Each structure stands twice: as C-alpha cells, then as structure tokens.
Image: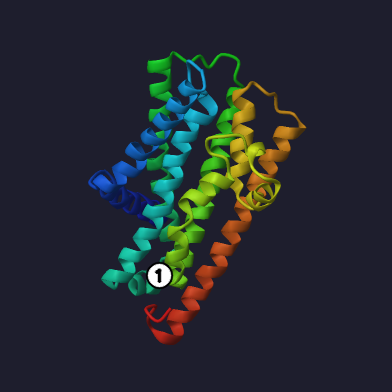
C-alpha cells in the first residue's frame, strides 16, 4: 500500500509540474473554455437573453475545457513516451502501464476541473447567479460520475495510443465530435435522432444530463437514478476495454521487445 501511494504521489507530482509549466496546457484548461463561454454569452445576448444560461453556457464551457484537456494531455503523454523511447521501459517495468496511465489521467482530469471552477466563479462574480434550489448532493454525485467517466475514457484512449500509433490520427479528431454528440453547451434533445443514438455510448452524456437535472433541483427520482446507473455502467465498459488493450500491449512487447512497429 505504501509503494502504491508513493507511486501515485510521485506520478501526480510530475504531471502537475508538467501541466503548470506548459502554456499549451493552461490554454486548454482556461483560454479555450473561456472563449467557448464568451461565444455562448454573445449568442445568448444576441437572442435577447440578458444573462447567459448557467447550465449550458457557463458550465458547458467548463466541461469543454475538461474534455479538451483530457483528450490532448493524456494522449500526448503516451506520444511523448513513444517519441523519447521510454514507453517500452514503462511497459516493461514492474508497475503496470494501466496504473501509470491511470495516475496521469487522474491528475489531468483534476487539473481540467479547474476550468469548471473558474467558469462557475466567473458566473457568480460577473452575473450574480444564485444556486438556491439546486439539489446539492445530486450535483456532487453527478459531477463525481462525470469525472469517473472522463477518467475511464482517458485511460482507454491512452492505452489505445500505446497499442497503436495509428490511432493517434483518430484521437485527434475526437475533441469536437464528442462535444457535439454529448451536448456540452446545448440540450441533447436538439440533435437529430441518429446523433442521439450515437451519443448513448459515451458516459459523459448521461452524467451531464444528471447534473443538469440536479442543477434544476430535481430530486433523486427514478430518472436520476437511471442516468447515474447508465453513466457508471458505460464508464466501467470503457475501463474493461482499457484493461484488454493493456494486456495486448504487454503481450506485444514480450514478443517483439518494442512498440514502434504498431
């Protein structure tokens, strides 16, 4: 247990230093979500709304920052390992790759969550939003499930890049499609039916729906429970797929001694 905690603290300390000292990472976590929120506010003002919608414009911009940060930081870490020749050393070490990736993704998500906190703080200070009437326990649980879903997707994408470098091209294209499919900044109901069917495979969609219902003060009824259950179940599926990819990576390196051929 002591070794596990030391590894977690050391790995997360390194990740935190990398994120803080990287202007590119800070731009992902703060500048980009601020731009999305600002555009949403301008559109809301043009539509005649004095204050932008808290749930879709403000919080949606924060979620956008969390997702963008996760996609690029978690996957670029693996690319850097491959480029610098340390990926084989990590896979061949006694510590499983999925554990290293898990700690990295966890810190990246926690760092990305600062964009959400910044967005909410700005909404309170600038627009004087009131959070009276919200279901606080349900919001906290929904946000925790959102973080868990992001974490599971993060380690899945990282393991996918470790298994195949060709997947990097695919991962680079995921940022905006997932944001559109999961309705970060608008109700999912405005999407065409076929897009809503595609979005059901992403846990972020369900935890976001649950958080928005909780923000409206909805009690923990059957609808909320089903949203939580679906989000948790799909997140676990992503985690199981990441474990399967981790096994394939270890099997490949035992046979070839390297990971540059895939």
Provide the residue designation for mark 1.
94
Q: Quadrant of the N terminus?
A: bottom left
Identify which residue is drawn at 45% across, 55% down.
102
- Label 1 secondary element: loop
Residue 99, picture quadrant:
bottom left
> Picture coordinates of residue 250 (x, y %)?
47, 75
Foreground pick, 126 / 160: 126
> Picture coordinates of residue 38 (x, y %)?
39, 29
Above or below, comparing residue 167 to residue 56 in the picture: below
Identify which residue is drawn at 64% across, 45% down.
231
Q: Quadrant of the C terminus?
A: bottom left
Identify which residue is drawn at 44% across, 82% down.
254
Residue at the farthest right position:
222
Foreground pick, 261 / 61: 61
Foreground pick, 147 / 54: 54
Identify which residue is drawn at 35% across, 59% down.
76
Residue 217 in view in this figure: yes
């Amino acid at each position: 247990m002591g070794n596990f905690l030391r590894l977690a603290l050391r790995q997360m300390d390194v990740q935190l230093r990398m994120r803080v000292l990287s202007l590119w990472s800070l731009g992902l976590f703060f500048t980009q979500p601020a731009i999305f929120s600002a555009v949403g506010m301008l559109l809301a003002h043009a539509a005649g709304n004095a204050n932008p919608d808290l749930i879709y414009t403000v919080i949606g911009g924060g979620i956008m920052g969390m997702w963008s940060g996760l996609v690029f930081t978690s996957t670029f870490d693996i690319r850097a390992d491959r480029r610098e020749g340390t990926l084989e050393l990590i896979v061949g070490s006694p510590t499983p790759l999925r554990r290293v990736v898990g700690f990295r993704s966890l810190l990246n998500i926690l760092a990305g969550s600062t964009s959400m906190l910044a967005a909410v703080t700005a909404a309170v200070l600038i627009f004087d939003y009131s959070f009276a009437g919200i279901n606080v326990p349900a919001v906290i649980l929904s946000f925790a499930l959102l973080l868990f879903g992001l974490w599971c997707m993060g380690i899945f994408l990282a393991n996918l890049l470790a298994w195949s470098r060709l997947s990097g091209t695919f991962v680079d294209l995921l940022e905006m499609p997932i944001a559109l499919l999961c309705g970060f900044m608008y109700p999912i109901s405005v999407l065409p039916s076929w897009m809503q069917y595609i979005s059901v495979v992403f846990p972020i969609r369900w935890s976001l729906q649950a958080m928005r219902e909780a923000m409206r003060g909805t009690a923990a009824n059957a609808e909320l429970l089903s949203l939580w259950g679906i989000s948790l179940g799909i997140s676990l599926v992503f985690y199981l797929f990441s474990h399967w990819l981790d096994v394939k990576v270890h099997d490949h390196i035992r046979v070839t001694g390297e990971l540059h051929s895939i």
